[in-house]
Image (cartoon, rainbow, N blue to C red):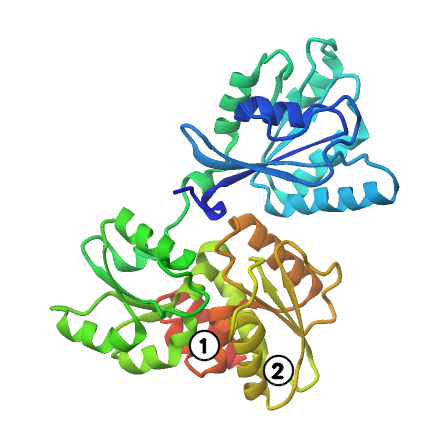
Amino acid sequence: MRAPKTFRLHIGIFGKRNAGKSSILNALTHQDVSIVSEVAGTTTDPVEKPMELLPLGPVLFIDTAGIDDAGDIGGKRVTKTLAVFDRTDLGVIITNFSDWGNYELQLMEEFKKREIPFIIVFNKIDKYTEQIDIISELDNLKIKYIYTSATEGDGILDLRQLLLKSAPADFINRPSILADLVGPGEAAVLVVPIDKEAPKGRLILPQVQSIRDLLDYDSFCMVVKERELRQALSIMNKPPKLVVTDSQAFLKVAADTPPEIPLTSFSILFARFQGDLPEMVRGAMAIDNLKAGDKILIAEACSHHPIGEDIGTVKIPRWLTQYVGGKLQIDSVRGHDFPPTISEYKIIIHCGACMWNRRAMLSRIMKARQAGVPITNYGLTIAFSLGIFERALQPFPAALDVYKSQQTN
């Protein structure tokens, strides 16, 4: 089974048109992933290629359109290229010595501003001579660079090694989803409702990832449906360290779980794993300030087609309407689409982003913070609107402190 995008290091490939970005990607992956042509601007939309880059593991290469593209269509390509920064963990600037200039410097500044590690690849070294002044400046700035010729295959192995060395430490030392809350030799009970949006024969991704996380850290795991929880707890010879539920079953699971057993939801776990849990706790508390007529943005990372009582388009709007006591104006977005202006919204409610890497979610949190708009996620919203917010935060002392301090202010 392929590793999901969540766990892949996202490597963004940037540069001018016809710098050889697609050729480099094809050489790295040993496949014709991107179309290569002498005509500048052949790559129109970002092209993704998942692969195993040993010994690092699963990565996702993103080949982008040239940022020097011109015209109306070119402008749209540039917009899509710039959006790739939001989900890039490691940047690669493809250039050559004859083309080095302001575009490359702008890319470097963007990476520095976002604190994204990056390397520079001087491609077509078989055609262009090294320029000492450029190299001296990069050496002074301690910026990593390498020489390649994608068409000849020169330097590609060295480039793979440099990518491995440049991977951010927080990717290599990624925290667990929930195993740190459980511990080796201890048990967690996962409550997994089976609904229309769970395809037959499969569980949804956060549930699968949570099970694997527990197994990786030598913890035990019991998986039950919500109506079987009480019986499952009664047959265990000692209480589990944690009960985790799908947020949609929060009320029933909270009623069936003794108060001394910590309880939370998959979505809240992913607010910590993929984003910034204390910031999202602050965002959820803004629900108290909502009033009828306010505009809300609900953002879904997936582009799946809603089925039945979809959580984002049906259930959360219904619960919020009941909580506020009046109709709200609700806009919805899916995938990587996001409004360029978000200041008109009173709150942004995001899914758990299980299909994304963490940087993409953190980028959205940063945009919300810059716009002064509170942001939270599905699980926190549901727990808050159903009146079980404090209990759902019990496993997370830092987040619980944020909640209690906000209450006293």
Tell me the amino acid under the disc marked 2.
Asn
Where does the image place residue 107, in percent across and percent down from the top left? Answer: 72, 35
The residue at 65%/14% (across/down) is 151
Mark found first going from the N terminus, 1 or 2: 2
The residue at 49%/46% (across/down) is 5
Residues under labels 1 and 2: Cα distance? 16 Å
Residue sitting nearer the eye, 97 or 211: 211
Check disc 2 and report the residue beneath it: 289
Residue sitting nearer the eye, 262 or 206: 206
Where does the image place residue 44, in percent across and percent down from the top left? Answer: 74, 38
Check disc 1 and report the residue beneath it: 383
Q: Relative to 214, is 343 on the left or the right?
A: right
Q: Relative to 309, is 289 on the left or the right?
A: right
Q: Is residue 392 above or below residue 222?
A: below
The residue at 70%/63% (across/down) is 371
Labelled disc at residue 115: none
Image quadrant assignment for residue 27: top right
As drawn, which residue projects farthest toward the left? 237
Residue sitting nearer the eye, 269 or 190: 190
Query: Which image quadrant: the C terminus?
Result: bottom right
Q: Residues within 10 Å of mark 2 (few under 14, many from 20)?
A: few
As drawn, which residue projects farthest toward the bottom? 325
SS for tag 1?
helix
As drawn, which residue projects farthest toward the right? 71
